[in-house]
Image (spheres, rainbow, N blue to C red):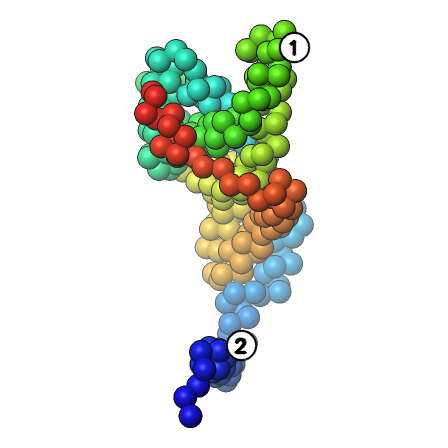
């Protein structure tokens, strides 16, 4: 007797569950769990990492990410307004900046600000400023397109209503359009902060003092010291402490805004063509 489509789907799911259970049983029987624990989560090593060392690295990661996000958000807003400007050179500059820094690896930007810029311009940045500039400059290229799309998602009737009340274009943009745009783009901006937190791991290329280390550099150095993966696992858990609440916040914000999708591609709005 031939099975119906629904019955075949149910049988297929049953086979998948069966294979998953078999794989779990095989791994549970074959793995040397004592050795796995010593290699990946040694309690004695974990105790040595807390509280001072790992807490300092966690704090530094949060500080670096926050500074980069704030600077990137401010610069991204300026770039978004330039991209929407009626002045063609502003649009060209913003477009070149966005395309360049979205195409260049963030690692190269860190190297440039850590070594290239000080040599070329005879200026010295402290590590905190270098991190803020490198992270913010890269993040701004992505945020600019998100902000630009959010501004264009605000109904034109809002601008027309503001202008009818006697507001100038600049005042209408600042007091009416931008606040509404930010309510729309809060979920993707939260996701950008998560990506920025992980990109902060590239700071190691500029060389940091012990009290300036972020989580990834701390994990790499501690792994060499303790000859095991426990420090890396602890560092990964600390990243989750930051990113999981942000991910939950992003989903809640997306539900509150009705799950509205923001397109960051110039072609989707025609801005690239008008530039």
Q: Which residue is mark 1?
A: 165
Q: Say which of 271 and 221 sits in front.
A: 271
Residue 16: x and y in percent read 46, 78
Q: Residue at x 39, y 21 (%)?
A: 94
Q: Say which of 81 and 226 sits in front.
A: 81
Residue 24: x and y in percent read 50, 79
Quarter of the rendering containing residue 166: top right
Residue 270: x and y in percent read 37, 28
Whole-angstrom CA distance, mark 1 to mark 2, is: 71 Å
Quadrant where the C terminus sits is: top left
Q: Say which of 258 and 35 sits in front.
A: 258
Asked whether residue 58 appears in the rendered view, the answer is: no
Say what secondary structure mark 2 lies in.
helix
Q: Are discs 1 and 2 less than 8 Å apart at CB? A: no
Instruction: Report whether 215 appears left or right of 145.
Output: right
Position of residue 176 relative to residue 69, above or below, is: above
Position of residue 171 relative to residue 71, above or below, is: above
Position of residue 165 relative to residue 186, above or below, is: above
Q: Which residue is mark 2?
A: 33
Q: Residue at x 59, y 29 (%)?
A: 182
Q: Residue at x 57, y 22 (%)?
A: 157
């Amino acid at each position: 007797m031939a099975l119906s489509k629904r019955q075949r789907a149910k049988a297929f799911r049953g086979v998948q569950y069966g294979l998953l259970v078999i794989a779990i049983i095989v791994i549970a029987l074959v793995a040397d769990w004592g050795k796995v624990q010593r290699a990946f989560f040694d309690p004695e090593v974990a105790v040595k990492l807390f509280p001072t060392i790992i807490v300092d690295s966690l704090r530094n990661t949060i500080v670096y990410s926050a500074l980069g996000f704030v600077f990137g958000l401010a610069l991204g807003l300026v770039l978004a307004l330039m991209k929407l400007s009626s002045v063609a050179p502003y649009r060209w500059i913003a477009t070149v900046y966005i395309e360049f820094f979205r195409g260049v690896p963030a690692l190269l930007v860190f190297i440039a600000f850590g070594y290239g810029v000080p040599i070329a311009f005879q200026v010295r940045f402290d590590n905190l400023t270098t991190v803020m500039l490198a992270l913010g400059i890269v993040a701004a290229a992505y945020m600019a397109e998100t902000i630009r799309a959010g501004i264009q998602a605000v109904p034109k009737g809002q601008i027309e209503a503001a202008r009818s009340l006697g507001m100038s274009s600049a005042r209408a943009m600042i007091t009416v359009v931008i606040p509404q745009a930010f309510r729309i783009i809060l979920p993707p901006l939260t996701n950008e902060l998560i990506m920025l937190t992980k990109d902060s791991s590239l700071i190691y290329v500029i060389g940091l003092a012990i009290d300036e280390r972020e989580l990834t550099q701390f994990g790499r150095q501690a792994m060499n010291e303790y000859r095991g993966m426990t420090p890396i696992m602890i560092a990964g858990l600390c990243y989750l402490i930051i990113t999981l609440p942000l991910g939950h916040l992003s989903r809640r914000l997306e539900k509150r805004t009705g799950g509205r999708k923001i397109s960051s591609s110039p072609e989707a709005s025609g801005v690239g063509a008008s530039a």
